[in-house]
Image (cartoon, rainbow, N blue to C red):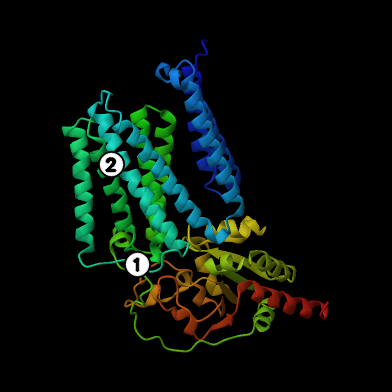
Amino acid sequence: MNLTPQFIIDACYFAAAFLFIYGLKRMSSPVTARSGIMVAGIGMLVAVLASFLYYFGVNDAALPHLGTNVVFAAVALFLGTAWAWWSGKRVAMTAMPQMVALYNGMGGGAAACIAAVELLRTNAVHQTIPLLLAVVGALIGAVSLSGSLIAWAKLDGRINGVWRIGGQQILNGIVFLATLGVGIYIVFVAHGHAAPGIVAAFFIGALIFGVMMTMPIGGADMPVVISLYNAFTGLAVGFEGYVLQNPALMIAGMVVGSAGTLLTLLMAKAMNRSVSNVIFSNFGDGGGEQQGEIKGSQKPAEAGDAAINMRYASKVIIAPGYGLAVAQAQHKLYEFVKLLTDAGVEVKFAIHPVAGRMPGHMNVLLAEAGVPYDMIYDLEDINGEFKEADVAVVIGANDTVNPAARTNKSSPIYGMPILNVDQAKQVYVIKRGQGKGYSGVENELFFADNCNLVYGDAQKVMVAMIQAVKSLEGGGH
């Protein structure tokens, strides 16, 4: 067997593709997700290191610039690894969606940069299909870059509210069509030999469109937008992989594109909305949607009283939300849960598909605290058990437990699948104040006869609950 550099590169790309797919498969279960991420990461490392072999006997044109190119590549690899390691170590669980948005944007930007290099090689002979895919990948990648940066800024609180003007959609359409027209010119008129100014105009138009498409979308929909841009990034990478005839990029792009598309559709379904409704509607901007008058009143309760009630319950179901992550109360919550289970109480966790800011957000948060996987249930598996529960506890969740989605046709969230916490005999909601959900919709659960609200930071509330149960069990010791 002749182990040429090209043979080694092809073998590495095959191994990387296998590791990508196998890693993604393991990510489908909380039990194996951690190892799946490691496997996929190893696959990426193999693909990156294999790319250095292009300078040794494969790409003869690169040999005159071997030293310079290798140094630049090594420096870029070092800087990227160092920044990712540092930021990954210090990022808070509440900021994980923002980091995902940034990584999506960087992937789209990388694909756009690859396309820019190809489009600016005016001395090259461009074939129509690869050139067309390069332009399409550039368009998608640039839109994903600027759009993801806006999504990150909105989730991180750096941009508040939405930006809308009269004729917004028409203006967006004009910008997109103008950018598309420049792209068509590059492919079919200039045949890849357009002036640098025209290429620059194409990328500027794509970046502007990404900003204009994302700015009018409400903050409640940003997780869906991030997932959509994730799919865009995958498509862009796949297209540029075809242009470069790089199997690893093609396979990785297709996997990311298909997974991102599926996730986007699942998230939209979990909110009973279409992707087009997310992108083009005014929902979720915190503007206070009208839903009709809510009867009843909000009834406060003390943390200690709620804890004692749960101590003597037979079955307790806990529905966590973003507020749990904000308060970093997962460890205290599980400490309290262990006190209940030691006392013979059956405790389960109910996870809504869009609890937190991204799918899986709550699963990761609970796993971090050591909650066993067999205590955690998805919506479709747990919803039928709420009517058997003595107590349901809502911690920092809002829209995902609003019964208006099931009963109030005038509510903007009507039809959205929710956790049926209102069907429990008693409901306790732990929340910091009387604010509305992230979508701006008032929660009818908070006014129900069987619901009491425990106001305060979730971590402080859990500490008070732990003390109440320990005092009850051990006389204050």
- Nearer the viewer's eye, disc 2 or disc 1? 2
Q: Is residue 275 left or right of residue 176?
A: right
Whole-percent x and y of residue 381?
Answer: 51, 61
**In this view of the protein, can residue 276 be seen by the observer?**
yes
Decide: marks 2, 1 in contact (CB < 8 A)? no
* Residue receiving disc 1: 162
Q: Secondary structure at mark 2?
A: helix
Q: Amino acid at mark 2?
A: Ala
Name the residue nearer the viewer: 35 or 114: 114
Question: Does residue 20 lie above or below 179 as drawn?
Answer: above
Whole-percent x and y of residue 413?
Answer: 37, 71
Write the residue at 26% across / 43% down: 202
**Mark 2 Cα within 10 Å, few/some/many (few <14, many 20+)?**
few
Write the residue at 21% across / 44% down: 180
Q: Quadrant of the C terminus?
A: bottom right
Q: Is residue 469 left or right of residue 98?
A: right
Residue at the extreme left: 189
Q: Is residue 422 left or right of residue 111?
A: right
* Residue receiving disc 2: 200
**In this view of the protein, can residue 360 be seen by the observer?**
no
Name the residue nearer the viewer: 98 or 469: 98
Q: Amino acid at mark 1?
A: Val
Total numbered badges shown on the rendered structure: 2
Residue at the extreme bottom: 296
Q: Earlier in the sequence, mark 2 or mark 1?
A: 1
Write the residue at 31% across / 63% down: 216
Residue 469's disc number: none
